[in-house]
Image: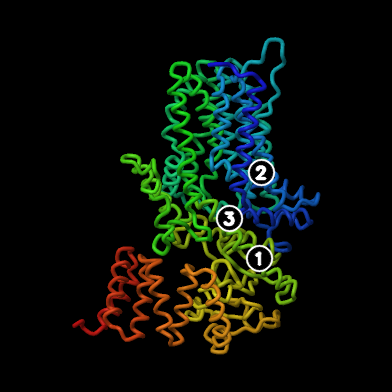
């Protein structure tokens, strides 16, 4: 292989950095969960302490202490957390790229152009681009782990003759990683213990080495535990109890690892990983491969045990720079014997890194859909078609289609349990939640809601941050009592614990959101119609209030209607069953639905809601074409066919009603919806016999 001059290597490396930054820009986003950390950081910067709700109980509802402190520091200098977070992440991304380039450049002259392969792969990987932003601490954590491993590898190497031993910095880096994310304790301890064993096997004093390297790591970890115990009264963060609580999810975890391996073509990496590890050993750097393994193995076990992650491959993203460096070594070794084989391997891995990830981005719907694609397969054509093997010109080929089909099945399975949800969904949800947060803030500024109002919702990122209200997280992330409650049976990762109305009264909740997120729904929201047809939730009536210009507040009032009405005189509360509210709502809703469907004629949710209104108002003929279109948009949704049957019944068409009910029954039975199947079967039996 022809050696690269330093100038050419630097130019090639700069091109990979440019590609990485452009790729990061394409996937630039922030997620709702990041705003939890932003709220803690803002409260710390403004003198309220490390708390979620100022003046209330201290609860550690974050898992990224160092990240929160950094954001609070920036806030003190006038850089708000939502601005500073992505700035820090991008800075860490550039630093991570520099670490990879530095490590690869140690053999650049011998490796030729292949020395740029690790940086090129890093730049072209979707997951690396996704976690270059997000507002979360992911990239800072990765930087500290990768730098810690690389620095540890240097510290283990014998110092050149005549030079002093290298200053031990790895322990500090791993200690900072442990302050950034809890799994830093596991990965740092594993890497440091393996390094101690290697040092001892080379005749170095293990005691002295441990004191200099493991000492700072242990000191930082211990200091954090002592702080947590003193400040929050707990040894473990509240997020542990809310998200894991000792309940392991191996089935989800193995599925998560499998989807990751299939999506990024890990099977293509394996031969080169083996060759690369051997190459490192032959060149006297076998300890580097051992340190990489010391981080990788416990991470894979940890991720499998906890059921993966709510986000797509976030905890596994740290493996990319590590794996690419070893793969690069493997390519160098392979190219010495078979240059063509090395080139073919590079092209194959590059294709695997790009194909499915890019398709997932291009095929993702432009609007927010919860649990896509798994929870939307029955009702959404884009969900049914998402990542279909026959739509890929390569993976649709005989044999390769098995890979694409297996990956697609895993993505559906995981997303139906809120595992591995993709960047596009989180980006869309933040827009949705931010709109609600700004709306509530506007109501506070207008005096409609008091500034110290207490609300309860399922999502406590942008809504509390932007509204600045006191908020109870109904899944327990920021509440010790709820977090320690047994899982309630909902098979949704990190959403398995639920608040009760007793929790609401303990917290002083005045407005309890009826839906999962919004207190104030758009006038065209189907949640409003659902509340009108189900006016009682649990033991309390659902209350409504028209919010100008085009919203409806839907809430339970755990502290009592009289108290809330006295606190919020700008809202006129009615129960959802009140005919006064129904008249006011229908007067506004009909033109609003007509306008929404004019602008978005394929909006199935709005279509369904408007058809229901038409049918309820006795206008079955106007509802019929809407239901016909719904059966085309969602042909596998048993609920759509059941409603279509109700429309046919209103039009006195028993034959068409029977056909629709039979279709609904078959779909309900196929999807295991026993309740619906029994209800539809009873309706079929009640129909007159067909002639």
- Camera-side residue of 198 and 568: 568
Tell me the distance, in whole angstroms, between the alpha carbons under discs 3 and 2. 16 Å
- Camera-side residue of 436 and 510: 436
Q: Marks 3 and 1: which is nearer the front?
A: 3
Q: Which residue is mark 3?
A: 427
Q: Residues within 10 Å of mark 3 (few under 14, many from 20)?
A: some
Q: Residues within 10 Å of mark 1 (few under 14, many from 20)?
A: many
Q: Are marks 3 and 2 in contact (CB under 8 Å)?
A: no
Residue 277 location (% of width, % of height): 49, 23
Q: Which residue is mark 2?
A: 89
Secondary element at image label 3: helix
163 sits to left or right of 675: right
Q: Residue at x 66, y 15 (%)?
A: 159
Query: Can the viewer see residue 178?
Result: no
Determine which of the numbered discs, if any, sits on residue 437 in the image. 1
Given the current orientation, which residue lies at the most extreme left position? Answer: 691
Query: Can the viewer see residue 271?
Result: yes
Residue 322 location (% of width, % of height): 55, 32
- Camera-side residue of 463 and 300: 463
Q: Residue at x 66, y 65 (%)?
A: 437
Q: Residues within 10 Å of mark 2 (few under 14, many from 20)?
A: many
Secondary element at image label 2: helix
Q: Marks 3 and 2: which is nearer the front?
A: 3
């Amino acid at each position: 292989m022809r050696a690269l001059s330093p100038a050419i290597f630097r130019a090639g490396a700069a091109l990979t950095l440019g590609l990485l930054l452009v790729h990061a820009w394409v996937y630039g986003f922030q997620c709702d969960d990041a705003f939890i950390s932003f709220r803690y950081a803002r409260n710390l910067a403004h003198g309220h302490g490390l708390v979620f709700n100022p003046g209330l109980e201290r609860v550690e509802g974050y898992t990224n202490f160092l990240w929160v402190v950094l954001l609070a520091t920036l806030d003190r200098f006038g850089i708000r957390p939502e601005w500073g977070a992505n700035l820090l992440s991008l800075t860490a991304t550039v630093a991570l790229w520099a670490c990879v380039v530095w490590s690869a450049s140690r053999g650049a002259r011998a490796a030729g152009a292949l020395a740029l392969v690790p940086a090129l792969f890093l730049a072209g990987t979707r997951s690396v681009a996704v976690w270059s932003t997000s507002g979360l601490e992911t990239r800072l954590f990765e930087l500290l782990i990768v730098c810690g491993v690389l620095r540890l590898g240097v510290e283990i190497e014998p110092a050149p003759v005549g030079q002093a031993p290298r200053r031990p910095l790895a322990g500090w880096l791993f200690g900072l990683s442990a302050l950034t994310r809890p799994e830093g304790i596991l990965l740092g301890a594993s890497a440091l213990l393996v390094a101690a064993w290697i040092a001892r096997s080379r005749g170095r004093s293990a005691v002295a080495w441990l004191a200099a390297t493991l000492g700072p790591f242990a000191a930082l970890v211990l200091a954090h535990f002592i702080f947590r115990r003193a400040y929050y009264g707990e040894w473990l963060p509240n997020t542990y109890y809310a998200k894991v609580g000792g309940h392991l999810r191996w089935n989800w975890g193995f599925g998560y690892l499998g989807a990751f391996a299939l999506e990024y073509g890990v099977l293509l990496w394996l031969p080169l990983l083996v060759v690369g590890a051997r190459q490192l050993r032959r060149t006297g750097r076998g300890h580097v491969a051992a340190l990489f393994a010391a981080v990788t193995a416990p991470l894979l076990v940890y991720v499998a045990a906890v059921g993966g992650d709510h986000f797509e491959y976030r905890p596994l993203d740290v493996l990319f720079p590590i794996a690419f460096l070893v793969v690069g070594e493997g390519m160098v070794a392979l190219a010495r014997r078979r240059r063509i084989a090395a080139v073919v391997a590079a092209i194959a891995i590059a294709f695997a890194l790009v194909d499915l990830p890019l398709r997932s981005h291009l095929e993702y719907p432009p609007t927010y859909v919860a649990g896509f694609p798994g929870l939307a397969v029955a009702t959404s054509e884009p969900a049914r078609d998402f990542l279909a093997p026959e739509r890929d010109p390569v993976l649709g080929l005989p044999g390769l289609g098995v890979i694409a089909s297996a990956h697609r099945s895993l993505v559906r399975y995981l997303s139906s349990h809120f595992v591995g949800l993709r960047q596009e969904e989180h980006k869309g949800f933040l827009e949705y939640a931010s709109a609600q947060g700004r709306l509530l803030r506007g109501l506070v500024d207008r005096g409609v809601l008091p500034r110290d109002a207490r609300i309860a919702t399922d999502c406590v990122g942008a809504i509390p941050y932007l509204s600045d209200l006191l908020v109870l997280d109904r899944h327990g992330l920021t509440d010790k009592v709820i977090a320690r409650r047994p899982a309630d049976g909902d098979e949704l990762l990190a959403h398995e614990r639920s608040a009760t109305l007793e929790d609401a009264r303990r917290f002083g909740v005045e407005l309890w959101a009826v839906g999962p997120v919004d207190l104030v729904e758009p006038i065209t929201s189907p949640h409003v119609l659902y509340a009108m047809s189900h006016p009682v939730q649990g033991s309390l009536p659902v209350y409504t209030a028209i919010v100008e210009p085009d919203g409806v507040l839907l809430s339970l009032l755990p502290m009592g209607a009289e108290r809330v009405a006295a606190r919020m005189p700008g809202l006129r509360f009615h129960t959802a069953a009140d005919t006064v509210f129904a008249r006011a709502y229908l007067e506004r809703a009909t033109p609003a639905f007509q306008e929404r469907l004019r602008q978005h004629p394929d909006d199935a949710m709005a279509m369904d809601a408007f058809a229901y209104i038409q049918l309820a108002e006795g206008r079955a003929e106007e509802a019929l074409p809407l239901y016909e279109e719904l059966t085309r948009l969602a042909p596998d949704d048993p609920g759509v066919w059941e409603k279509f049957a109700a429309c046919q019944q209103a039009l006195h068409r028993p034959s068409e009603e029977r056909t629709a009910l039979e279709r609904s029954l078959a779909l309900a039975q196929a999807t295991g919806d026993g309740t619906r199947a029994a209800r539809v079967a009873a309706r079929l039996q009640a129909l007159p016999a067909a002639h």
